[in-house]
Amino acid sequence: MKKVYVIGTMDTKAEELRFAAACVRGAGAEPVLVDVGTKRPGLGADFAADEIAAHHPEGSGVVLGLDDRGKAIAGMAEALTRWLAARTDIGAVLGMGGSGNTALVTQAMRALPIGTPKLMVSTVASANVAPYVGPADVAMMYSVVDVAGINAISRRVIANAAHAAAGMALNVPPAASGTEKPGVGMTMFGVTTACVTMLREALEPTHECYVFHATGAGGRSMEKLADSGLIAALIDLTTTEVPDFLVGGVFPCDADRFGAPIRTRLPYIGSVGAVDMVNFGAKDTVPAQFTGRNLYVHNPQVTLMRTTPEENRAIGRFIVERLNRMEGPVRFLLPLGGVSAIDVPGMPFHDPAADAALFDTIRAGLVPAPNRKLIEVDAAINDRAFADAVLAAFQEIA
């Protein structure tokens, strides 16, 4: 039977953690109590804090007994991440605590594969949980009262969480039968929807198409699925998160963008969809340094800023450096007629000089290799001719 790992600081929250473990056992699942306290040793855990801390690559000395609480928590988070990754009997992970333990436990949760149940009972779950959830399927439950003793409120909240974790561990989805269609990850934005829709309709008879909105979290989620072995190929047409990362928009990727195809060697088909824009919120939220730039109000909550030739050269360098590190089959396509629905003649972001800076940088920087090919298409990204070229590239390598 897969087990429910109940994780927290036994030196300060032993009563609550033991209560959660008892609820898990009462629901028919087997709990495993894990102590991640960094100050004083707790009592009664199945795995003590020093056992977990020993999995830090620099040893437990950089985790336990430190005066700097932030360093201690960061060290224990690293140790727990490595320790959990080596476990083979995880049915679910249940964490409980305040801001420190939430940061600690969710870091380890995010490293687990998509589909492994992860539930965090937290005092900060009613605020912005994006840093804790990231691209993973971490469920956050607000503790309502602090995780500080058992009372009429905490008893109900913790019991609900424990029963939920036990239910997920006991009701594991059936194993793959081997007849499922392979999954394909696709990135899309409103201004590249037409192209992705044509591809999705063409591929759905033979593939599961997972479309990700390229809002920063979308790209990270797609790559998390790729790292988890749940995607067989990537059609990464909409790389608009890169300009947001480089210029300062609200939908940025991070420095690990394109890391999954580098690590996994999955078939990768990419393009430069929507890199003509940096995304901001309402128009009055656009930073003052961009006054005078070409701005387009997409809707009352989203304002787009046209990227310049200089910015496009930086975008091209960012992308091509990562393409050159991919050792799996790669096809990267340039839509010479425009990289988005509003980067075509007569539309507000049509800027041939900016596009040329992007294309020239990628042409000059891509290192030729048997696995890696640059394909130029004399069409805009949403034209049928471009979608057909992407489909042909996919069929060649996937």
Image (spheres, rainbow, N blue to C red):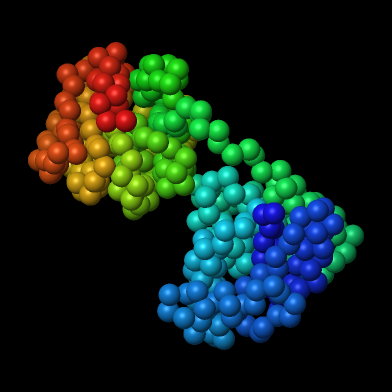
Q: Residue at x 64, y 77 (%)?
A: 48
Task: Return the x and y of residue 367 as percentages of the image width and height.
Answer: 12, 44
Foreground residue among 256 and 247: 256
Task: Return the x and y of residue 67 as percentages of the image width and height.
Answer: 55, 85
Q: Which residue is drawn at 80% across and 72% down?
A: 15
Above or below residue 62? Residue 397 is: above
Instruction: Looking at this view, name the residue that lies furthest to the top.
Output: 384
Quadrant in which the C terminus appears: top left
Task: Return the x and y of residue 47 as percentages of the image width and height.
Answer: 65, 74
Where on the picture, by quarter, is residue 330?
top left
Above or below residue 205? Residue 100 is: below
Where on the picture, by quarter, is residue 174?
top right
Foreground residue among 272 and 201: 201
Foreground residue among 12 and 242: 12
Quadrant in which the N terminus appears: bottom right
For residue 311, say whether it is visible: no
**As drawn, is 290 to the left or to the right of 227?**
left
For residue 32, say whether it is visible: yes
Instruction: Looking at this view, name the residue that lies furthest to the right.
Output: 152
Q: Which residue is drawn at 50% across and 47% down?
A: 135
Task: Return the x and y of residue 172 as percentages of the image width and height.
Answer: 66, 43
Q: Residue at x 66, y 65 (%)?
A: 7
